[in-house]
Amino acid sequence: MKIIKEKHAFAMRWTHWVNFPVLAIMIWSGLLIYWATGAYTITIFGQTLFKFFPQGFYEFLNLRSRLAEGMAFHFFFMWFFAVNGFLYVLYTIVSGAWRELVPKKSSFKEAWLVVLHDLHIRKTAPPQNKYNAAQRIAYTSIIIMGFGSLFTGLAIYKPVQFYWITWLCGGYHFARILHFALTVGYVLFFLIHVVQVILAGWNNFRSVIAGFEVIEVSALPVPQDLTEEPNLKDNPNGKE
């Protein structure tokens, strides 16, 4: 027997799907800006192992010579990103949904068990409610990262007007490094998130769109009708 169970509220689904294209545009426009001063590399003992990003990367995605366009898109969609994030946080506070999202004391230990289960090293998954321990940590982290992006973004955008934010970020150049690192974190989160959604199956994906999931349950035994007349042929005296 199948039953329909409500899982995700409309506010959660709305902010989730609005954030997806907005964040994609923010990353794309950020690459257009980064093209003008691409200075970051992975270097060990003076040897550059990787440069963010190789010239072929910009040529393949047509990201060259579009600095003004990138800045215009980035600063415009920044407001959608910020407002959408604040609405989501406000919803979790007002509705009490934050209790299901914030990690508990045991979450970090249980998250490791979730990883072992996903890798098919551990057979049984740790108990969970709406979200497992790994999801609690990941979803809370992505909210903190969002605030970090806004904070470091303001430090880069207006380093003089928001000098105190720039100072708290460790200066303009360190704020830029943090902003870039957070962007890399979004991309990694997105890739892992998509893989997890595929592994979870259609029922889980549908719940983020429609708000409900279909659960298979075993049929319950039919209770005996206590109002039924006793069989007097078998028990004429009506006694046990």
Image: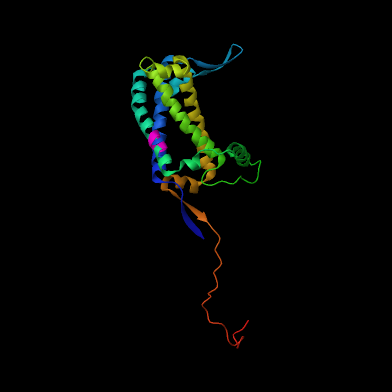
- Please give left or right for residue 214 compared with residue 68 in the image: right
Image quarter where the C terminus lies is bottom right
Task: Pinpoint residue 227: horizontal percent, then vertical percent.
Answer: 51, 77
Q: Does the magenta segment cover residue 86?
A: yes
Q: Classify 69 as above or below 129.
A: above
Of 167 and 62, the residue lying toward us: 167
The residue stretch that appears in magenta: 85-89
Tell me which corner region of the image, top left, top right, bottom left or bottom right, holds residue 107: top right
| 21 relative position to 214: left or right | left
Q: What residue lies at 41% left-to-right and 15% top-to-bottom?
A: 36
133 w.r.t. 227: above or below: above
Q: Nearer the viewer, residue 170 or 210?
A: 170
Q: Residue furthest top?
A: 46
Q: Position of residue 162 (x, y in %)?
A: 38, 18
- Magenta portion: prevailing SS class: helix
Does 142 appear above or below 61? below
> Where is residue 146 shown, x and y percent of the image?
44, 30
Residue at screen point 52% across, 60% down: 1
Viewed as shown, does residue 24 lie left or right of 221?
left
Q: Is residue 63 something one can see in this rendering?
A: no
Please tell me how many numbered marks the rendered image carries: 0
- The residue drawn where x is 50% and y is 58% is 2
Tell me what residue is drawn at x 42 percent, y 36 percent.
Answer: 89
The reply to whether residue 7 is visible in this rendering is yes
